Image (spheres, rainbow, N blue to C red):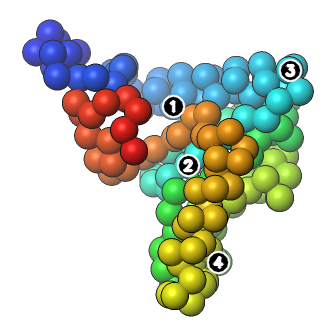
Amino acid sequence: MNSFERRYEKIPVEIYKESSEASAFIARHVANLISTRAAEKKNVVLGFSVSSAIIGVLEELVHIHKKEGLSFANVITFNTEAYFPMPIDALQSRFRFMNEYFFESVDIPAQNINFPNNQLPKNEIAEFCVRYEEKIAAVGGIDILVLGDCQLAFNEPGSPYNSR
């Protein structure tokens, strides 16, 4: 990143030549936090968006789980989105995506996986969203939020690091 780009950037940014390098870096950072918190007998709260851009991170986390024995037993997850309405097993389902690439391959307890309910009647969605936010707050907030390429627009460059 050159000095002109840094002048406007408020969020720390690392640029890698290959996406596999970035995926490995992110996965290792997540794995280290999981290990540290497990030693302290504490949970880690991970948030995930769903996009093809995070597949490398998910695959690397699964690799670390299988090859290095990293347990996800102390991990609680919250996903950021789900198509409405859509069966959870549909090809485009965000839930199916996360199961296929991650949840089915690691030992996260099923009760620790949180997903927006896309099967609710429309008049119950707003209340569900309030409860979802409260549940995130009740576990201490999200420690690491893994976003894909298009989700970066949710926190535009130049935004304060703590913006909603």
Q: Mark 1 against mark 2, which lies toward the viewer?
A: 2
SS at badge 4: loop
Label 4–label 1 contact, CB within 8 A: no
Query: Residue under circle 1?
Result: 23
**Between discs 1 and 3, the one toward the N terminus:** 1
Q: Which mark is residue 48?
A: 2
**Between discs 3 and 2, the one toward the N terminus:** 3
Left or right, 58 with respect to 13, comes to right
Q: Give the residue drawn at x 87%, y 20%.
A: 39
Label 1–label 3 contact, CB within 8 A: no
Left or right, 1 with respect to 129, comes to left
Q: Give the residue drawn at x 33%, y 25%.
A: 11
Q: CA distance from mark 1 to mark 3?
A: 26 Å
Q: Residue 55's x, y, as percent?
A: 53, 46
The amino acid type of the residue labelled 4 equals Asp
Q: CA distance from mark 3 to mark 4?
A: 36 Å
Q: Which quarter shows the C terminus?
A: top left
Q: CA distance from mark 3 to mark 2?
A: 24 Å
Q: In the picture shown, does residue 141 fall above or below 112?
A: above
Q: Which mark is residue 40?
A: 3
Q: CA distance from mark 1 to mark 2?
A: 14 Å
SS at badge 2: strand
Q: CA distance from mark 4 to mark 1?
A: 26 Å
Q: Mark 3 against mark 4, which lies toward the viewer?
A: 3
SS at badge 3: loop
Q: Residue 111's x, y, as percent?
A: 83, 58
Q: Mark 2 against mark 4, which lies toward the viewer?
A: 2
**Between discs 1 and 2, the one toward the N terminus:** 1
| Total tally of numbered discs in the picture | 4
Query: Is residue 90 shown to the viewer in this render?
Result: no
Q: Give the residue drawn at x 36%, y 38%.
A: 163
Mark 3 burial class by Cα count in 10 Å: few <14, some 14-19, many 20+: few
